[in-house]
Image (cartoon, rainbow, N blue to C red):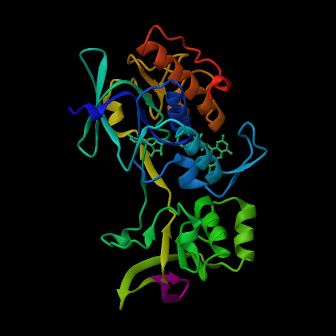
Amino acid sequence: MSLDNYYDVAIIGAGPAGLYAAYYAGFRDLRTIVFDGLPQVGGQISTMYPEKLIHDVAGFASIRGADLVDGLLSQSQRQPYDLHLSENAIDLTEVEGGAYDLKTDRGVEYRVKSVVIAAGLGKCDPRSLPELDGVQSSNVVHFVPDLSILDGAEVVIAGGGDSAVDWALAAQSRARSVTVVHRRNRFRAHEQSVNEMYESGVRVVAPGHVKAYRKDSGKEYLTIAGGKTIEDVPFTKFIMALGFRSDLGSMTDWGLNIDGFRIPVKPDMETCLPRVFAIGDVSEYPGKVRLISVGFSEAAIAVNHAAAAMNPDQSVLPGHSTNEV
Ligand SMILES: Cc1cc2nc3c(=O)[nH]c(=O)nc-3n(C[C@H](O)[C@H](O)[C@H](O)COP(=O)(O)OP(=O)(O)OC[C@H]3O[C@@H](n4cnc5c(N)ncnc54)[C@H](O)[C@@H]3O)c2cc1C
């Protein structure tokens, strides 16, 4: 194994809990690697509600989801660490000398002294329409990491939940046209947002469904059926906001005593495996509350205990950040 693949701590998941754990790992001078199977950081916030205002993060009367993620990322990057996106952790094996070998779905192996699992709901696979199986187009997406890609676009969105409606509202002021297609006539999204969408000028085809994709002379179209009408709608961005399939996947074979979708932890966030910690939505203990702010606190607890467990000369309490320059 190359020396480049040795780390003090591997953080699995770059949602809010994982990013804050990365900040603390830097504060403790740990050589750190962070993995996320998705192409972007931010976990559920980036995938499901980047444009929503979050009102219960300490220190902010309210903050847009994407802004909180940006802040967490830049705070975590005060100290350098390796961030590997689109790379899932798939195997963890204890090796001699009190370390672990962590394998990813890129076929790479890393030797780590401790692990912080911040996997949220687990490995996320965005759902796609079977009608688009085999379609290779950079204009067919599941997320909009940067709203500017919608500027002047002809946007079609499939889905009936909060993400679909939020993308539609966000696209409306930027795009040339916005069409939302939903299989049912009732949306599952927040009622006020749905009303706003209907009033905003977004074209809604509900009930309706996408029957096919076609490309003709460089232009892309979706065949959309709604009521008795079938039409070819041109698009330059098609967002499939159909939710995610998530599961802990191979983590269930890591010896973690996983209970359904949750990993039981002790008060210091350590799992039943030494120096393997679990934080955020994935962790479970009596009295657990699944909120961003709780995940932050668990990240601080886990990383500081990991630092002390790896180096018994160090105390769990890191000292105050105000002493840093
Ligand atoms: C619509 C909605 C609104 C919400 N509103 C609020 C709110 O107002 N206030 C609040 O406090 N909470 C809110 N929440 C809940 C909040 O988003 C979660 O509690 C929080 O995101 C959990 O953070 P996390 O870091 O534990 O996990 P996640 O955000 O789920 O991130 C986990 C990350 O781990 C990655 N991952 C999983 N398995 C692997 C693997 N094997 N290898 C690599 N990467 C992996 C995933 O891809 C994901 O990016 C809301 C949730 C939703 C869905």
Tell me if 89 is positioned left or right of 233 in this view: left
Percent x, y of residue 265? 49, 21
Q: Is 278 in front, or is 241?
A: 278
Magenta part of the protein: which range?
Answer: 223-234
Instruction: Note whether 11 is above or below 190 in the view shown.
Output: above
Q: Residue furthest left?
A: 1
Tell me if 83 is positioned left or right of 97 in this view: right
Q: Is 42 in front, or is 321?
A: 321
Residue occupying the point 73% across, 36% down: 58
Q: Is residue 109 visible?
A: yes
Magenta: main secondary structure equals strand
Instruction: Note whether 67 is above or below 144 in the view shown.
Output: above
Residue occupying the point 31% across, 15% down: 98
Ligand 1, by image quadrant, is top right
Percent x, y of residue 226? 54, 82
Is 236 in the magenta? no
Q: In which quadrant of the rendered image does the C terminus lie?
A: top right
Q: In which quadrant of the rendered image does the N terminus lie?
A: top left
Residue occupying the point 35% across, 46% down: 87
Is 229 in the magenta? yes
Q: Residue furthest front?
A: 325
Instruction: Note whether 276 is above or below 47 in the view shown.
Output: above
Percent x, y of residue 101? 27, 28
Q: Is residue 181 visible?
A: no
Count of numbered tags: 0
Percent x, y of residue 134? 30, 70
Q: Is 19 in front, or is 227?
A: 19
Residue occupying the point 41% across, 64% down: 128
